[in-house]
Structure formats: C-alpha cells, structure tokens
Image: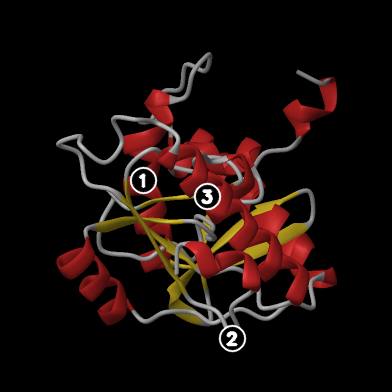
C-alpha cells in the first residue's frame, strides 16, 4: 500500500549465460532461480495461493506471481548472508520411501525453495509465514500442533534447535496422549521421523 511500492516492479527474464536459469529483478537487485524451481513454485502457488484467508489473488497474473516469488526468495537470500547453521538435506529418493512406507507428506523444517519436489501435496513448516504461505507453508514448526499423521523433521543441527525440536515433539505427543479418543480413532496415529546428528533425553518417552 506504500506509494513507493508502485515503483517496485519485478521483471522476469531468462539469464543470458544459462538458459536453465531465470532472473527476477527489482530496484537494482537481481535474483537467479532455476527454471525447474520456478515451475515448481508456480504449481504450488496455483494450488495454495487461492486458499490464503483474507487475500484475493489472481493466480493468472504473472507479474503478481513473480513479485511473490521475488519477495520470498529475497527473504531467504538475506537470511543466508547471516545464517551459519548446518542442515542435512534428504534426497528425493528418501522422501519417496517416507511417502510409500510411512505416509509422510509434510516437512517440519523447509522452505518453498527446498521443499521436496514431485508432489504439490507435500506441505511444510517454515520460518516466514508471511512470504511462504502462498506456496503451502503451515507456519513455524513450533506453532504446529498436529493431531494425527506422519511427519519428516529435519531441524538445523545446532544443539539448541535440536533440543527445542525434540521438546516440541514430546509436547505434541503428550497432548495427543491426553485425548482419550486419539488411539482408538480410525485416523493414523502420530509419527515423527527425525533426521538429526544426536537425540536428546527429552525424546526418550516416545522414542
């Protein structure tokens, strides 16, 4: 709504040096994004953007789509400038096993740029709900309280993040355990598959 927002026009073009890369430019800043990732984002945007409460978007508007992608991508590029954390990425084949064997269609730590490709049904938790909700984000994992289902959990590998993650999982499980109907329901029970370099004591009760 700010007057200067009208001056911030995102321009989309192909990168001259690499036909597999696209460029999104705005106010002198250019971001590079692989065309396959941009296609994946478009599929997710078409599916999830119309579901955002209180927002009416014309998903056929390419300019609006590129603006939403630019805003999201810029947020993560800015974060990467300061982020020193490590995280192990699972290959797509591993996600396929999780889907086929455990019914996992949700990542508890991801972003629109690195959520597992291949299925728009794959939802995720994210750091930035304001920019990521248009691509299927379900808010921060630490604000996420599922009652049923299977989830892939791959937190940053620093000690505080892993400890906080296991504590939140325990809190979710204890909340579910307190509901009398949880384990007699026809819905699948809760399962968290955690990728981590170590396990904290907090997890012992449900490990």
Q: Which mark is residue 131?
A: none
Counting residues from the start of the chain, the first of labels 2 and 3 encountered is 3
Rounded to the nearest angstrom, the CA distance separating label 1 from label 2 is: 31 Å
Q: Residue at x 59, y 78 (%)?
A: 199
Mark whose residue sits in front, 1 or 3: 3
**What colour scheme has been applied to the protein in the rendered image?**
secondary structure
Number of other residues with Cα within 10 Å of mark 1, as a class: few under 14, some 14 to 19, many 20 or more? many
Q: Nearer the viewer, residue 110 or 41?
A: 110
Which residue does the numbered mark 3 point to in the structure image? 125
Which residue does the numbered mark 2 point to in the structure image? 197
Residue 79 lies, in percent from the top left, at 77, 62
Pointers 1 and 2 in contact (CB under 8 A)? Answer: no
Side of 61 where 120 appears, left or right: left
Is residue 127 in view from this perspective? yes
Mark whose residue sits in front, 2 or 3: 2
Q: Is residue 179 above or below residue 142?
A: above
Residue 90 figure quarter: bottom left
Residue 145 lies, in percent from the top left, at 50, 39
Counting residues from the start of the chain, the first of labels 1 and 3 encountered is 1
Counting residues from the start of the chain, the first of labels 1 and 2 encountered is 1
Rounded to the nearest angstrom, the CA distance separating label 2 from label 3 is: 20 Å
Dot 2: element: loop
Instruction: Identify the image quadrant of the C terminus.
Output: bottom left
Pointers 2 and 3 in contact (CB under 8 A)? Answer: no
Which residue does the numbered mark 1 point to in the structure image? 44
Number of other residues with Cα within 10 Å of mark 3, as a class: few under 14, some 14 to 19, many 20 or more? many
Is residue 14 in view from this perspective? no
Q: Residue at x 64, y 36 (%)?
A: 130
Dot 3: element: loop
């Amino acid at each position: 709504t700010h007057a200067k927002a009208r001056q911030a026009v995102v321009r989309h073009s192909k990168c001259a040096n690499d036909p597999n890369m696209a460029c999104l430019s705005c106010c002198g800043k250019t971001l590079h994004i692989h065309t396959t990732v941009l296609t994946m984002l478009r599929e997710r945007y078409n599916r999830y953007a119309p579901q955002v409460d209180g927002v009416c978007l014309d998903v056929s508007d390419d300019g609006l789509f590129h603006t939403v992608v630019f805003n999201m991508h810029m947020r993560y590029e800015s974060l990467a400038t300061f982020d020193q954390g490590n995280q192990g990425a699972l290959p797509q084949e591993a996600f396929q096993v999780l889907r086929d064997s455990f019914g996992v269609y949700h990542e508890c730590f991801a972003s629109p740029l690195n959520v597992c490709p291949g299925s728009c049904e794959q939802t995720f938790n994210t750091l930035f709900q304001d920019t990521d909700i248009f691509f299927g984000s379900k808010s921060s994992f630490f604000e996420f309280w599922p009652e049923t289902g299977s989830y892939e959990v791959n937190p940053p590998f620093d000690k505080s993040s892993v400890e906080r993650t296991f504590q939140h999982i325990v809190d979710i499980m204890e909340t579910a355990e307190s509901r009398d109907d949880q384990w007699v329901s026809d819905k699948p029970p809760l399962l968290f598959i955690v990728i981590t370099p170590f396990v904290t004591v907090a997890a012992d009760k449900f490990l």
